[in-house]
Image (cartoon, grey):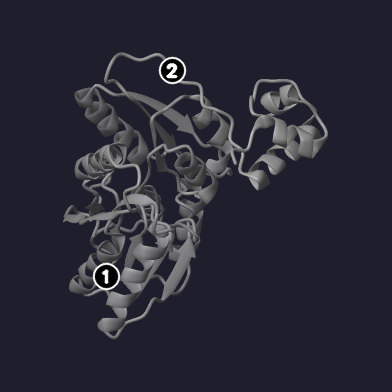
């Protein structure tokens, strides 16, 4: 039996008009009542009908949900997707996750957009948005994120293999003491890069001499590495789980007179445009964003063709980009 707005209204002792307002962010409604309605809607399995946007024949709209927009990796990713969707004559909407929030904070926004599909590229991931999209028959693909739900589609760099390559690189440069600077601890990118790195070090009979969390943030990482390098147990090699943290590590090393690539080897991950700048020359691991975007759009097309298709995970190998830092 289909759950309606009246069912939600009855369960909350309110009107269907109030239920409608609760799902519109701009509508005026008592916050306590809004929370009660949204909780009841989730429990009953109710979702308001999506408003369809006017579009030309055959043209579709795809929403991209992204967090950490200050990270150049994501701005580059959006440019690649914009070109890919333009070639397919699709429209692209971008939804920014507020700092410190999960993608679920954008649920009502994405649902109101009338999009035909959603791509989720946010570190702070939970299942509510993905589940809501699936309930509405809207294809959803996780981009560079993986989750345990086998019914979800995901496209991801082979972060585990990237971690292995990073360890092998530092070992080949005769680094005897090695550190790892991680990102946000519960994200799949952090976990897989760290796991590959540690597994490869263990196979070489080595272990970390330092591990810290820079939260994918320049300022936090700069402070963390400055304290580390000013101490007595300075590592000879550092693997940072993304380029922004590696760039912070380079700046911290230079501040105390160290030469990256000579006095200390520093590796990053992503190959953002800044990594190639003359002032950094960062050795890093390039994610094949073009291939990942193509795979993502192909998965969306697969679900449009077959809404009952099983979830799929596509992994794309990254490659070492050798520069001067490590």
Return the x and y of residue 319 as percentages of the image width and height. Answer: 18, 55
Q: Position of residue 294 (x, y in %)?
A: 21, 40
Q: Answer left or right for 287 relative to 74.
A: left
- Residue furthest to the right in view is 13
Pointer 2 with pointer 1, Cβ within 8 A? no
Q: Nearer the viewer, residue 180 or 14?
A: 14
Q: Determine the secondary structure under disc 1.
A: helix
Residue 66 position within the rendered picture, expressed as x and y whole percent measured from the top left: 44, 38
Front residue of 307 and 252? 307
Q: Identify residue for label 2.
A: 53
Q: Vertical placement of 256 versus 84: above or below?
A: below
At a point 64% along the width and 33% down the height, the residue shown is: 4
Considering the image in quadrants, where does the C terminus appear?
bottom left
Q: Earlier in the sequence, mark 2 or mark 1?
A: 2
Q: Quadrant of residue 75?
A: top left
Q: Position of residue 95 (x, y in %)?
A: 47, 31
Q: In this picture, is 25 found above or below 245?
A: above
Whether residue 236 can be seen here: no
Say which residue appears at 41% left-offset and 42% top-offset: 120
In the image, residue 230 sits, relative to residue 111, either above or below, namely below
Residue at x 24% of width, y 54% of height: 285
Q: Nearer the viewer, residue 225 or 207?
A: 207
Q: Which mark is residue 310?
A: none
Q: Secondary structure at mark 2?
A: loop
Quadrant into which the N terminus falls? top right
Q: Residues within 10 Å of mark 1 (few under 14, many from 20)?
A: many
Residue 275 horizontal side relative to residue 230, left or right: left
What residue did someone put label 1 on?
Answer: 167
Q: Quadrant of residue 46?
A: top right
Looking at this rendering, what residue extends furthest in the bottom direction? 205
Identify the residue shown where x is 51% and y is 51%.
Answer: 220
């Amino acid at each position: 039996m289909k759950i309606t707005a009246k069912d939600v209204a009855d369960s909350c002792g309110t009107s269907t008009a109030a239920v409608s307002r609760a799902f519109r962010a701009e509508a005026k409604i008592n916050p306590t009542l809004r929370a009660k309605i949204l909780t009841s809607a989730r429990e009953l399995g109710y979702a308001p009908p999506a408003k369809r946007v006017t579009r030309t024949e055959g043209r579709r709209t795809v929403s991209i949900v992204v967090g950490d927009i200050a990270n150049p990796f994501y701005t580059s990713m959006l440019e690649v997707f914009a070109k890919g969707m333009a070639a397919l004559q699709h429209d692209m909407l971008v939804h920014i996750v507020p700092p410190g929030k999960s993608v679920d904070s954008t649920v009502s926004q994405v649902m109101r957009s009338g999009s035909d599909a959603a791509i989720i590229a946010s570190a702070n991931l939970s299942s509510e948005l993905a589940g809501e999209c699936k309930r509405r028959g809207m294809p959803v693909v996780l981009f560079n994120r993986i989750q345990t739900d086998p019914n979800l589609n995901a496209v991801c760099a082979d972060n585990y293999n990237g971690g292995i390559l990073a360890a092998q690189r530092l070992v080949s440069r005769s680094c005897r003491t090695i550190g790892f600077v991680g990102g946000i601890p519960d994200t799949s990118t952090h976990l897989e890069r760290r796991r590959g790195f540690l597994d490869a070090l263990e196979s070489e009979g080595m272990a970390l001499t330092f591990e810290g969390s820079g939260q994918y943030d320049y300022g936090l990482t700069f402070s963390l590495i400055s304290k580390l390098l000013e101490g007595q147990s300075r590592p000879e090699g550092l693997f940072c789980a993304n380029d922004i943290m590696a760039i912070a590590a380079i700046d911290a090393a230079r501040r105390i007179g160290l030469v990256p690539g000579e006095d200390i080897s520093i590796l990053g991950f992503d190959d953002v445009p800044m990594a190639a700048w003359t002032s950094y020359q960062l050795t890093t691991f390039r994610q094949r964003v073009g291939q990942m975007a193509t795979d993502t759009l192909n998965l969306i097309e697969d679900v449009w063709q077959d809404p009952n298709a099983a979830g799929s995970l596509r992994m794309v190998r990254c490659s070492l980009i050798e520069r001067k830092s490590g």
